[in-house]
Amino acid sequence: MYINTITQMEVRRKMTSRIPKIVIIGAGYGGIVTAINLQKKLNSNEADVVLINKHDYHYITTQLHMPAAGTDHVDNSRVAISKLIDEFKVDFVKASVTELRPQEKSVVLDDGRTISYDYLVVGLGGEPETFGIPGLKENSLSIRSINSVRLIREHIEYQFAQYKLNQERKELLTIVVGGAGFTGVEFLGELVNRVPELCRMFDVDPSLVRIINVEAAPTMLPGFDPELVEYGMRLLEEKGVTFKIGVAIKECTTEGVLIAGDEFIKAGTVVWTGGIRGNHLLEEAGFETARGRIKVDPYLKAPGHDNIFIIGDCSLVINPEGRPYPPTAQIATQQGENCAYNLVATIRNKELKEFQYINRGTVASLGKKDAIGVVGSKKIKGSFASFMKRVIEWRYLYTIGGIPLVLKKGIFTK
Amino acid sequence: MYINTITQMEVRRKMTSRIPKIVIIGAGYGGIVTAINLQKKLNSNEADVVLINKHDYHYITTQLHMPAAGTDHVDNSRVAISKLIDEFKVDFVKASVTELRPQEKSVVLDDGRTISYDYLVVGLGGEPETFGIPGLKENSLSIRSINSVRLIREHIEYQFAQYKLNQERKELLTIVVGGAGFTGVEFLGELVNRVPELCRMFDVDPSLVRIINVEAAPTMLPGFDPELVEYGMRLLEEKGVTFKIGVAIKECTTEGVLIAGDEFIKAGTVVWTGGIRGNHLLEEAGFETARGRIKVDPYLKAPGHDNIFIIGDCSLVINPEGRPYPPTAQIATQQGENCAYNLVATIRNKELKEFQYINRGTVASLGKKDAIGVVGSKKIKGSFASFMKRVIEWRYLYTIGGIPLVLKKGIFTK
């Protein structure tokens, strides 16, 4: 009798007053965490939640340097969205967003559909920032998605295979990595581990393979502890990386890169990891952006748009010292949690919570059993740091998929 | 005392009268079988035997369609020459021959050395014959060596990886195989088995992949039993191959192939299996050749050169009906045996033996568990034919490497 009454009330409510519709675009760190938190916190009559993503899987961007180098299978860096989302609570739409229409409260999809919303969460992720360097966009590869890293692995193998039939073209065995930020350094760490295997696969003399890092900033991992940077650089150098630090790439062609000092490095492969900007759709929709990113208010909303939340690589959050936080998985995940909280609060007419970034530590891997990092105020390096890197991964996997996901993706696959 | 006398005699003989030097160039079917037979039959004081080959391994050409398609590891199609040759009996030199100098009884190597000989065995193998079709040599891949098939596998995978980032370019998923002879058909059989795996690897819809065979002759496998040809074609068609039989390729570009009727087939991959000619070094050395092949005398000697034997794809042997035997592994192997016999006979001043080709049966595989063939006067097809194909492989492995090689390469690897 009691249950019956509730049900009838709900039905009436759904029929008479439309419930709000939350549309989340992008299922990266920010988007998927928002969706998972909403499905936990919201009752089914409180809101309709729609998650729109280009692929039917979520990928773990912080692991992509491994399948890119070919040291791990690409499937270990992704999870089917159907495993993370309760389809009774969240509608999943597999499509690319091609346009944002904030005035009309809608987004346009590549299949021609228009999806309207009451609240929008933009978690579209970043794009490579090539700073206008001529030819870089056209002639370099980037570590940004499952498809893009699969291409890097195949591209490198294809260069090795071609070399065997054109042995005067030694440049086919040269790999230039542009940028020595997190992604660049972690990719270098995997590459030096992969080279021996590549040489065995293709009967190539390892001494012919060159891995060159070109970074315009005066140091590898700018902003990181100098002692740890020194440790990491030495380790990578010992394993065969040549560093050109404080050297800018001036141009990229199909043959290689021209660097400051007018040296041309012939290379079969150029991977650009030197910059991330926000998604181009934001600028196109008329938002005010800095390198494609929107400086959000304390509640992660786009200025002047009370119903639009911006999280992840598309958002710009200023730290207490007045500088922007770098775009990381860690901040995106925390933004997802905060965004979901604020959406629930909005719907329930409760008070919103300001976003506070908590630095839970930063670890950069340097290949299979080495890493450098800062956790709390402690500097760590070596195999312990490498272990901590995995703990951070496991924590994330646990957050989105519980223990089953940790067991499936986090342990047995390494 | 007796042994001592023998040894002293040998030493004296070696010192006083120079023993003849046999140089074998190429360690394909013909060359390796010649070398193995010579090391079995010759006493150490009878001749010096030198085997020269570009690679330090012998490869099993009749299996290369598998690593080319990616259905088997390339290492299963090769054997280290050191495992086949007794280094106390045969000197192995890893080098490419760049010139033959029959007048001076020597060959020139790519490292600049000149090697002189008393007897020369030419087993340099074939080269793709492109019949002057414009662009075919430059823009197609061929199944002719470990390196070339590794490139085919990597090329196809690279096209699939590129497609995922350029999904309007569906032609990246099209593979054109030119030629429906033995190699072409066996490659098609493996390709159709590989496609499902490729589609899983790259998340590609299998219905988008096109495999097109273009053959100028009026039938697949010209000269083969028509009933078996019909069976094979139907089977491959069912698995997704489109046949264009009786259709010539007019031109090959980086974009695909132009075929008779002025149809242009856009394709990311073009593999040419449509013809084999002899090695270009023979023509360059002044030998009279037909498509690079020398019509040998009944003892496999080059006309007018009593000390030069030509075997394998470089030789032309006319059958009793007056037509040339097609160049196969089977004939090359038998030529190697005959050539070794005749070299030993020459050195011992015995009578030479005319070369007689014995057709031990011909089987063309159609993928993992199917094949068509004629053994004796019996037509075979299906899994029994596929088994017979393997028996033929095992027999060859046994001939060159005994039971250990059969166990290593022939059984556990499939």
Image (spheres, coloured by chain):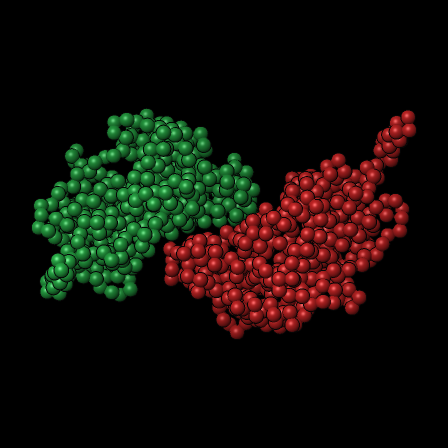
Chain colours: A red, B green
| Residue at the (65%, 62%) spot, across then down | A385
In the rendered view, does A124 fall on the left or right side of A367? right
In the rendered view, does B129 fall on the left or right side of A353? left
Task: Name the one closer to the observer, B282 or A113.
Answer: B282
Q: Is residue A25 above or below residue A384?
A: above
Task: Name the one closer to the observer, A339 or B140.
Answer: A339
Task: Name the one closer to the observer, A107 or A77.
Answer: A77
The image quadrant where one finds the C terminus of chain B is top left
| Residue at the (17%, 38%) spot, across then down | B356
Q: Is residue B323 above or below residue B251?
A: above
Residue B137 x/y as whole percent: 34, 49
Q: Is residue B85 visible from the viewing direction of this image?
A: yes
Residue extending furthest front? B1
| Residue at the (28%, 30%) spot, across then down | B375
Q: Is residue A349 above or below residue A290?
A: above
Q: Is residue A257 visible from the viewing direction of this image?
A: no
Residue B92 x/y as whole percent: 27, 58
| Residue at the (80%, 52%) spot, across then down | A338
In the rendered view, does A385 fall on the left or right side of A68? right
Task: Name the one closer to the observer, B374 or B79.
Answer: B79
Residue B344 x/y as whole percent: 14, 50
